[in-house]
Image (tube, rainbow, N blue to C red):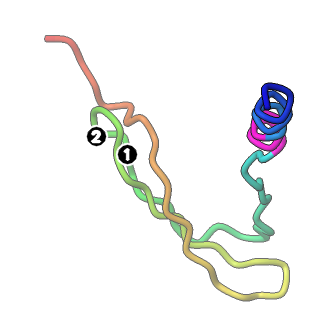
Amino acid sequence: MKAQIALLLGAVVLAACTSTPAVSKPDIARVISVTDTQAACGVVPVTMVYDDSLGVRHTLDYRVLGSGCHDN
C-alpha cells in the first residue's frame, strides 16, 4: 500500500514538473500600433496591433509596467 502511494505521488510530481505552459512566438512582420504607456504608472494593459508575414492583422493584449511613475 505504501509503495503504491509513493508511486502515485511520484507520478503526480513528475506530471506537474513536465507540464510547462506552451510558449509561442508571434509572427510579427509589421507593427501597426502599440498603446502608449509613458504617462501610466504601475501595471497597465497594452494592446499591440500587427500584421504577420502573410499580411493578416492581429491584436495582442498584454500587461506592462508603465514608465510614468514619478516620486514627488
| Residue furthest out toward the left | 72
Q: Which residue has dot 1 on it? A: 37
Q: Assess whether residue 10 is covered by the magenta stretch.
A: no
Q: Which residue position holds label 2? A: 40
Q: Which residues are magenta?
A: 12-18
Circles 1 and 2 in contact, beta carbons < 8 Å: yes
Q: Quadrant of the N terminus?
A: top right
Residue at image point 76% right, 33% down = 5
Q: Is residue 39 above or below residue 61?
A: above
Lateral position of residue 39 relative to residue 21, left or right: left
Tell me the quadrant of the picture where the C terminus can be found: top left
Q: In the image, residue 24 lies at what x, y percent?
A: 78, 59
At mark 2, the secondary structure is: loop
Q: CA distance from mark 1 to mark 2?
A: 5 Å
Q: Foreground residue, 9 or 26? A: 9
Q: Is residue 25 above or below residue 41?
A: below
